[in-house]
Amino acid sequence: MKVIIYNINQEDKKLLALANRKKHKITIITSPLDETTVYFADSKDVVILTDHISPEIIELLSSLNIKYLLFDSDELSPAETSLIKNKGFTFIQIKNSDQKPKAFQIIDILDEWEKSDKDHSERK
């Protein structure tokens, strides 16, 4: 899968690279997701977020045809959850204080989504 992650620190970046083992094409942006960086997500399948996102950013991600959102952050607000669902995103929020397993959780989720996409395309 083509993935972009925003606002990631060096330690998390290393752990994610180790967990990924070059399975997925991951673009890493050290800046937060905002109106100026959102366009780096163009042509990606998945956006991994470490912060809350505004309704405007959700709209922009939808316009870029992003399919999946993976949140590595605190609880989503009801308004965020509602808008994300209404825009048709598949999304998941992971919570884990131990960073190494979290990186592996992220890759496992990406693997599942990729398999699901392949299963759906084979049925058509």
Image (cartoon, helix red, strand yellow):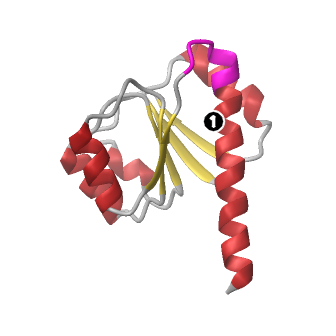
As rendered, which of 98 and 43 lies closer to the eye?
Answer: 98
Image quarter in which the N terminus is found: bottom right
Residue range in magenta is 96-102
| Mark 1: secondary structure | helix
Few, some or many residues within 10 Å of mark 1 (<14, 14–19, 20+): many
Q: Which residue corresponds to the image point at 44% horizontal and 59% vertical from the top-left?
A: 66
Q: Position of residue 67 (x, y in %)?
A: 48, 60
Q: Is residue 94 left or right of residue 58?
A: right
- Location of residue 17 by image quarter: top right
Q: Is residue 8 left or right of residue 76?
A: right
Q: Of all residues shown, which one is farthest toward the bottom?
A: 124
Q: Is residue 55 left or right of residue 119?
A: left
Q: Is residue 98 left or right of residue 54?
A: right
| Residue type highlighted by circle 1 | Ile
For label 1, the residue is 106
Q: Of all residues shown, which one is farthest toward the right?
A: 21
The answer to whether any part of residue 100 appears in the image is: yes
Image quarter in which the C terminus is found: bottom right
Q: Position of residue 50 (x, y in %)?
A: 42, 28
Say if 71 sits above or below 123 in the image: above
- Location of residue 99 by image quarter: top right
- Location of residue 81 by image quarter: top left
Q: Position of residue 12 (x, y in %)?
A: 59, 19
